[in-house]
Amino acid sequence: MKVTHLPENGTNFIPYEVLKNNIDFNDGDLMFNVSKKERDYEVVIDICQDYTGGLVMGTAEGQKYVAQVVIPPREYIETEKENPAYLADTEGGTESPTITDREPVPFNIDNCELRLWEMEA
């Protein structure tokens, strides 16, 4: 996982740990499986501190940015194969002679980015 510190010369960032596909912030204060958030489009998850100092996902309850997790769009391997409906079609229908099979590439947390914002001391 690529980690970006904002600002680069900052000194006070939230502690985190990456365990396989899980990310754990502040020794269990907030933890989730990053792979379960992957979609066919880029996903950006905001991690904020609420008014009690606890961590929350999203900005609705959050008051201070702590981090962002950026998950790139899911990738696919596409392969073409013969279309059985085309082979069975003897009347010259609209079926294509091939179909495209899409298989998702296994999730890799190394493709994700963690952006950490400096916290107030």
Image (spheres, rainbow, N blue to C red):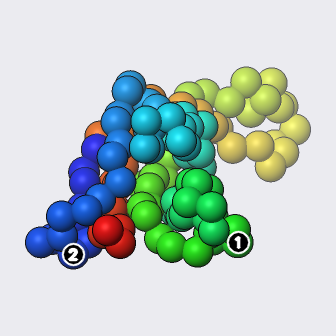
Q: Is residue 60 left or right of residue 74?
A: right
Residue 98: in sight, yes or no?
no
Instruction: State the image coordinates of residue 64 (x, y, percent, origin top left).
Output: 51, 73
Instruction: State the image coordinates of residue 90 (x, y, percent, origin top left).
Output: 84, 31
Give the residue at x 42% y 61%: 67
Q: Nearer the viewer, residue 46 or 40?
A: 46
Q: Which mark is residue 7?
A: 2
Classify 10 Å Cα crowding around label 1: few (below 14), some (14-19), many (20 and above): few
Residue at the right extreme, as displayed: 91
Give the total of numbered labels: 2
Q: Is residue 18 left or right of residue 42?
A: left
Q: Please state, as top left, top right, bottom left or bottom right, where the N terminus lies in the image.
A: top left
Give the residue at x 18% y 64%: 11
| Residue indicated by mark 1 | 60
Q: Which kind of residue does numbered mark 1 sit on?
A: Ala
Q: Nearer the viewer, residue 114 or 59?
A: 59
Give the residue at x 25% y 54%: 3
Give the residue at x 37% y 27%: 19
Q: Label 2, secondary structure: give it.
A: loop
